[in-house]
Image (cartoon, grey):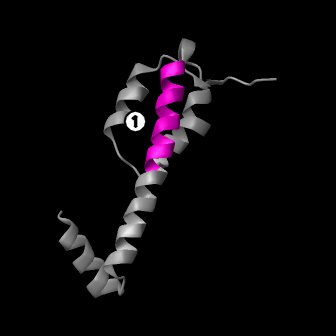
């Protein structure tokens, strides 16, 4: 989808100007980059190759990355029992 299409859709249907759309896209890009970077760093530290590849390829505007950081990275799937690693 070209930028003109985004501006047209947001401008005509939602009443958002091209400048506001650009700012929104920039904010979402920075938001995604920060969470993706943190999640990739954590996945690499835990030597979790499947999660690293999934996070690298799939773009979910930070949702998958946040879930990995706060939920999935704390789980252990050894011996087919779900365990949570708790730090004391």
6 up-or-down from 35: above or below: below
Seen at 54% across and 19% down, the residue is 46
80 up-or-down from 9: above or below: above
1 up-or-down from 14: above or below: above
Left/right placement of residue 46 relative to residue 30 reads right
Seen at 31% across and 37% down, the residue is 57
Left/right placement of residue 74 relative to residue 31 reads right
57 up-or-down from 84: above or below: below
Seen at 27% across and 86% down, the residue is 12
- Answer whether residue 37 is magenta in the image: yes
Q: Quarter-wise, where is residue 9 in the image?
A: bottom left
Question: Where's residue 69, x and y in %?
Answer: 57, 36
Seen at 35% across and 84% down, the residue is 14
Toward the top, the furthest residue is: 79
Q: Main secondary structure of the magenta part?
A: helix
Quadrant that contains the N terminus: bottom left
Label 1 sits on a secondary structure element that is helix
Magenta residues? 32-45
Quadrant that contains the C terminus: top right
Question: Where's residue 65, x and y in %?
Answer: 48, 41
Residue 21 versus residue 54: which sits nearer the camera?
21
Q: Quarter-wise, where is residue 15 in the image?
A: bottom left
Question: Where's residue 68, x and y in %?
Answer: 52, 36
Left/right placement of residue 44 relative to residue 10 reads right
**Residue tagged by mark 1?**
55
Q: How many residues crowd mark 1 within 10 Å: few (<14), some (14–19), many (20+)? A: many
Toward the front, the furthest residue is: 19
Residue 69 versus residue 82: which sits nearer the camera?
69
């Amino acid at each position: 989808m070209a930028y003109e299409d985004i501006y047209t859709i947001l401008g005509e249907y939602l009443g958002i100007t091209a400048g506001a759309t650009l700012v929104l896209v920039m904010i979402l890009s920075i938001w995604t980059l920060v969470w993706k970077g943190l999640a990739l760093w954590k996945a690499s530290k835990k030597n979790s190759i499947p999660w690293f590849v999934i996070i690298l390829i799939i773009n979910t505007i930070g949702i998958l990355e946040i879930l990995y950081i706060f939920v999935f990275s704390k789980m252990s799937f050894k011996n087919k029992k779900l365990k949570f690693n708790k730090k004391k």
